[in-house]
Amino acid sequence: MTDAATSMKTKLPIACFVLEIVLIILFGTLVQYDAETDARAWHNKTHFDFENDFYYRYPSFQDVHVMIFIGFGFLMTFLQRYGFSSVGFNFLIAAFALQWATLMQGFFHGMHGGKIHIGVESMINADFCTGSVLISFGAVLGKTSPVQLLVMAMFEVTLFAVNEFILLTVLGARDAGGSMTIHTFGAYFGLMVTRMLYRPNLNKSNHKNCSVYHSDLFAMIGTLYLWMFWPSFNSAVTAHGDDQHRTALNTYYSLAACTLSTYAMSALTAHDGKLDMVHIQNAALAGGVAAGTAGEMMLTPFGSMVVGFLAGIISVLGFKYLSPVLEEKLKIQDTCGVHNLHGMPGVLGAVVGAVTASLATVEIYGEGLRDVFPDVASGRVDASHQGGIQAASLAVTLGVALVGGLIVGLVLKLPVFGAPSDAACFEDNVYWEVPGDDLITDGQLTAVRTEETEKLSGPETQ
Amino acid sequence: MTDAATSMKTKLPIACFVLEIVLIILFGTLVQYDAETDARAWHNKTHFDFENDFYYRYPSFQDVHVMIFIGFGFLMTFLQRYGFSSVGFNFLIAAFALQWATLMQGFFHGMHGGKIHIGVESMINADFCTGSVLISFGAVLGKTSPVQLLVMAMFEVTLFAVNEFILLTVLGARDAGGSMTIHTFGAYFGLMVTRMLYRPNLNKSNHKNCSVYHSDLFAMIGTLYLWMFWPSFNSAVTAHGDDQHRTALNTYYSLAACTLSTYAMSALTAHDGKLDMVHIQNAALAGGVAAGTAGEMMLTPFGSMVVGFLAGIISVLGFKYLSPVLEEKLKIQDTCGVHNLHGMPGVLGAVVGAVTASLATVEIYGEGLRDVFPDVASGRVDASHQGGIQAASLAVTLGVALVGGLIVGLVLKLPVFGAPSDAACFEDNVYWEVPGDDLITDGQLTAVRTEETEKLSGPETQ
Amino acid sequence: MTDAATSMKTKLPIACFVLEIVLIILFGTLVQYDAETDARAWHNKTHFDFENDFYYRYPSFQDVHVMIFIGFGFLMTFLQRYGFSSVGFNFLIAAFALQWATLMQGFFHGMHGGKIHIGVESMINADFCTGSVLISFGAVLGKTSPVQLLVMAMFEVTLFAVNEFILLTVLGARDAGGSMTIHTFGAYFGLMVTRMLYRPNLNKSNHKNCSVYHSDLFAMIGTLYLWMFWPSFNSAVTAHGDDQHRTALNTYYSLAACTLSTYAMSALTAHDGKLDMVHIQNAALAGGVAAGTAGEMMLTPFGSMVVGFLAGIISVLGFKYLSPVLEEKLKIQDTCGVHNLHGMPGVLGAVVGAVTASLATVEIYGEGLRDVFPDVASGRVDASHQGGIQAASLAVTLGVALVGGLIVGLVLKLPVFGAPSDAACFEDNVYWEVPGDDLITDGQLTAVRTEETEKLSGPETQ
């Protein structure tokens, strides 16, 4: 399968070197330690070491970091012959995106005397932005070259920062866990990109667009890390104290309820009442997405569970009934079903956030209102207005994601990025040295041997 | 293998939906944020944000959480054709059990004006209770339907909470890491359940009750996460400060010593001096179990290592010599050998705890005595009495576990839960869509090809 | 493959039991809780619970712990038939080494009235020392018995502690993340050991010295955990406050930059522009190694990225061009390429540390100078002198490592430790019960079937 068109021999080194050198120059010019990472600045203040933000947020940061690299990376290893690319491209574009996001978010979050200040909170935000790119990666999985992915990441991170700036700074919306900024944005951006990259003849490689036994177990590693650490994700940048605590707790119960509705719906809708790994790997996570906006609010454990419960149902129904329609009618080839895991649950989360915000009162939040809804606490807006802001933010996010995805999708169609042919989709050995390909590999073994196997094993294997 | 008797098409959705809806209603009626998660309550107090219990316990909580979902889940993936069920049913019953445990433990730990208050400590306790259910799952692994497991979890969580209430509140025992409440209880409960579900013809599926090469590597992921995070498990709910610190340290050294004795005993007892993965995956963890009660006490690093050392020896001997006897004579088919990993080491841990408690003095503990043995510090009991309480607690635990397991085992025998036939045990495709089963799968490949393989490969494979 | 020469039936139990019993006796005689783990001592002081060092360091400790057991363990599972040994021997020697390191480092770090005091910081240091042993294990992977490895660990831990003492205490060098003490030391020690154990006929088992598809995915688990948690590794024992914060941040950006240069170089140098898993699994980590010494210094994000960028390039070039030369000309059979991941990047890190130290001023560090360069702050040495100390420390480390490795390598050649024959290298079933070896296993399947497969599948498999 060596092919000049898809060869990365010069394209990938050029892309990586140019991007990284530009990043290094910009970091050298623009980026500084913040007051909690700088030796001089920190020791210039009156405070105790345990007040350093590092101790409030670093454990959550590491959990988020695991979600980005192991969670997303392994979630996508379900494909039988695309594990190297799933984990490996995830690794590459995440490592790029977190650096680029530091700059883009730094511009918009406010410069300090012409400098971007960084510390643990900016690291979390950079990882969050990266998560959005990886969601979009899920939509185009198996059909893009690493150079295309880097180009997509570059544009998407920029648009993410713009959208985030509009929502959080201009409009004053609240979205700590990113139902809108991360999930809705990443999903609809990715869906539009994959729409633009529509391949009518993708069926040529469809026999590889499925899992084998052990690839599904690898994917479960990704699922479980995302599931376990989602409470840290949603609470990572909320206010210190009760806010982080409450957000983690809400997310924990939302996910637990979501898991039960996912199993129920999977058995109900799948063939013969058998559970479908695709649902378990994905829909059980929808509760985390849907608690992204309202998680820091006084949603109550009850409210969190209702949200998670609904998210699981919606997500499985999406996989079962909506995805085939999207592919057939709208020509959206959504490899990982990000619409079901991030798209619809993200919209649900935004709506829940808007409703919960509009119900906020001093009665319920006490002095804590300043942390969760500073504009309501200060009297700048009332609660129902805050709810309206939240709803408007969803609309803005959808707009930016769809228009942005359209444009970036068009850019990615340029025939210079080394995209694989239709027959070479979902196949690692286009871009990777695959061990044993001079002999034979597990994945192929299954396929190659079908005929022989049927003869040999006959009725024993069903 | 589609079969009306085992079909989950209606049974599993009904079970999941009914349980989750009941949970949601009860949470809506009974559960509230505690004073550290509630916005109004937290901001009503005079304290610093860093004093929120979240920062003391959340990192430990996340470690425990990983143990529950990745640790237990992957530990059980060693079976060649039961990986989906091991990880997947573990996921399902854990997600249910942690919600149910929040309620059951909340009832017994003391209501606040008719309400259960929750926060990071209740989340840890819910995960602990879930751990107990997963231990029992290990005993019946491969022989039960997901509906049976949910029913078992429902009853077991309830009995766990009752037993825990008797031990910690009524008797005043100490058991921070749960040698008794979690491990002894979960193991003997599960052993009794599997005894009640005895299958005389289980040999029909015995060829699947073993591992393949990569399934053993997946299982090692589970083992190592359990091993690494056990110090967090044992210290997660001990008192702030030196107690958490000391418990983590004791457990660390107990596990290290246990690992060396496990390797020694495995080579000594196994065939030809070759190491047996079953021992490494399980017995090396016994040191964590055995340090569960005494871990928070002034056990000393020396004492911890002695305990771990003995636990490893006992556990390997159990796998080698006791498990076959239990199966043959007592008809206890203990799939994962939980008696060796959780049963005997749990009893050892209880005994060590009783002895260590009876040796407690103000000399050794200073003011810290109030944290570890409040009843001894207050003069309500003396140290030897505390030791007696610990011993009595072990007896109570064994009693509740065995009687509870007997009754629940009888319930699970009701022919309505979709249990698999003897020939369909240890087989994923009873309850899961397994990829490639229309062709052939790795696991079956090995079995199916035996004959052909012998012919082909002959002497080369040994 | 049962063979009296390699049988572990008596050798391994004797080694494990003797070592563990000696450890237990020495711990009983010499080791005590420190002031933050001892119940009496902690409660004797005036402080708040949140000031206990546990809360500053335990999350980092657990991340380091995961790197040691999962990170190193799974990184080495890339070999097709050596997964049990990679993970399993890693587990064994790490469990031993961390106990032995507690004693050895305790001797040199200063006794308290004849006693070694331990707590979370000593646990981290013990894990660090263990990391060094595991680096050396990477050099000899596949060619040693578990008893040889235990013997190597015993000597290496001792020499590590001596070298660390010379560097940090005698010379006054700074090396928080261990570019010198851990990586350079471990790599060159291991390279010398493998040189002494040179096997001219290793080609007899070379067909097993490579990966299969799923073994490369297991290895990526190791890689990613090392990559994600390296910021915790480098910052785990730096001073509280800005120092931990800054070190984590520097390492994060160093690794991100390193990842991009690794992908670029891999595509540039590998066959047909295809990415090589060996590079991705290893070279992408070099940025963490290279930031080990200077990570706590005011290296700036820019400086960190430059260092990581260079480390990735050097490391890939090493794998591609230097490793074959080392093997052919110098007879150094470096299974995992530790020279490229730990050796050269470690030296780079030491040099960067020396340069950064020599540029330290009160202007840049303010009061923080006392934390990072106490000797410069106190006026005992000036910055350029500190730089000289750093450079001298590198030379000392190389000397101790090479001489130590030579001697220990000679010891390991003694024909009593059960080393495998040349034909039995890289093969689990010398020391492990391997499932299905009475039938056939995945790994062998591939090999055994080559001939038949070619016939069957023909052009389809390339």
Image: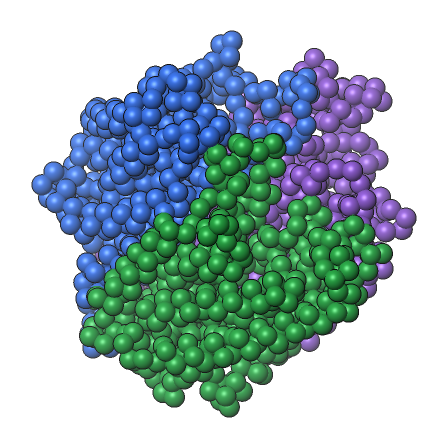
Chain colours: A green, B purple, C blue
Nearer to me, B291 or B368: B368
Question: Which residue is the extreme one toward the bottom?
Answer: A329
Relative height, residue C2 to residue A281 (above, below): above
Image spot of residue A103 (x, y percent): 44, 57
Side (left or right) of A42 relative to B130: left
Q: If the image is split into quadrants, where does the N terminus of chain C sit?
A: top left
What's the residue at 52%, 47% (across, down)? Answer: A120
Image spot of residue A3 (x, y percent): 21, 75
What's the residue at 71%, 17% (across, down)? Answer: B366
Question: Which residue is the extreme one toward the front?
Answer: A113
What's the residue at 52%, 41% (across, down)? Answer: A35
Nearer to me, A254 or A376: A376
Nearer to me, C205 or A286: A286
Image spot of residue B316 (x, y percent): 50, 37
Side (left or right) of B453 relative to B412: left
Question: Which residue is the extreme one toward the right?
Answer: B113
Q: If the image is split into quadrants, where does the C terminus of chain C sit?
A: bottom left
Relative height, residue C405 to residue A238 (above, below): above
Residue C31 in sight in this render? yes
Residue B426 in sight in this render? no
Side (left or right) of A341 relative to A38: right
What's the residue at 31%, 47% (across, down)? Answer: C306
Image spot of residue A149 (x, y percent): 37, 69
Side (left or right) of C130 relative to B11: left
Query: How many badges with numbers are in the image?
Result: 0
Relative height, residue C186 to residue A211 (above, below): above
Question: Which residue is the extreme one toward the top?
Answer: C113
